[in-house]
Image: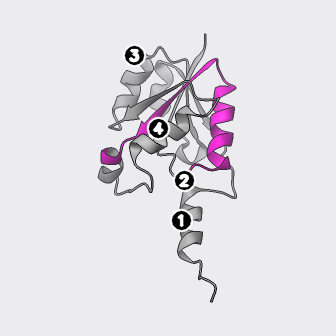
């Protein structure tokens, strides 16, 4: 069984997230998602719209996702790869090169993101909506 792992906040789940998760799952037989906790996001200066438990429930409902684990620190990735016997580590292409240090314990793949959509774009678009009179 080939195990794949990826990480993210997965806030305001959208088709770009689904595309990434589907393609990550296609690289193996079992997909683990390290989901950023609210506390970890706060340390990065980020705040998700949905709290961790709701984002976890959303991810667990997807057929591509086999296991959701909490991401609580940048440094945990190597330990997770070893603990879960991961074969392939996957991140979006905006992280290109940032996790190459894991290549000694697993394959590292950077997948192209869906260019026209992102959580940041959705949040920005919603901020600029003007209610109709």
Would residue 117 appear left or right of 45 to someone viewing this image? right
Quadrant in the picture for the C terminus = bottom right
Q: Residue at x 54, y 53 (%)?
A: 12
Can you name the residue that lies furthest to the bottom here? Answer: 133
Where is residue 88? Give x, y as percent: 57, 23
Crowding at mark 1 (Cα within 10 Å: few <14, some 14-19, many 20+): few
Residue 111 can be seen in this image: no
Q: Which residue is mark 3?
A: 83
Where is residue 57? Give x, y as percent: 49, 37
Crowding at mark 2 (Cα within 10 Å: few <14, some 14-19, many 20+): some
Q: How is the image coloured?
A: one colour
As measured in the structure, the alpha-carbon distance from the residue carrying label 4 to the one carrying label 1 is 20 Å
Q: Which residue is mark 4?
A: 56
Vertically, is 39 above or below 6? below
Q: Residue at x 62, y 36 (%)?
A: 21
As measured in the structure, the alpha-carbon distance from the residue carrying label 2 to the one carrying label 3 is 29 Å
Where is residue 110? Give x, y as percent: 60, 37
Q: Residue at x 69, y 55 (%)?
A: 115
Q: Secondary structure at mark 1?
A: helix
Q: Using the image, tell me which numbered label, if any, was put on residue 12.
A: 2
- Mark 4 or mark 1: whose residue is earlier in sequence: 4
As measured in the structure, the alpha-carbon distance from the residue carrying label 4 to the one carrying label 3 is 20 Å
- Mark 2 or mark 3: whose residue is earlier in sequence: 2
Q: Is residue 2 magenta?
A: no
Q: Quadrant of residue 66?
A: top right
For the residues labelled 2 and 1, say whether their Cβ atoms are less than 8 Å apart: yes
* Camera-side mark, 4 or 3: 4
Magenta residues span: 13-39
Q: Secondary structure at mark 4?
A: helix
- Mark 4 or mark 3: whose residue is earlier in sequence: 4
């Amino acid at each position: 069984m080939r195990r794949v792992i990826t990480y993210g906040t997965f806030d305001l789940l959208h088709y770009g997230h689904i595309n990434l998760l589907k393609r990550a799952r296609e690289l193996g037989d079992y997909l683990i998602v390290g989901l950023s906790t609210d506390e970890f996001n706060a340390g990065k200066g980020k705040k998700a719209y949905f709290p961790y438990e709701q984002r976890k429930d959303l991810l667990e409902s997807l057929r591509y996702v086999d296991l959701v684990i909490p991401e609580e620190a940048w440094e945990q990735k190597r330990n997770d790869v070893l603990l879960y016997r991961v074969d392939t580590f996957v991140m979006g292409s905006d992280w290109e090169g940032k996790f190459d240090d894991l290549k000694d314990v697993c394959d590292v793949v950077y997948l192209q993101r869906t260019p026209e959509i992102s959580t940041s774009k959705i949040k920005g678009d919603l901020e600029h909506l003007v209610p109709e009179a």
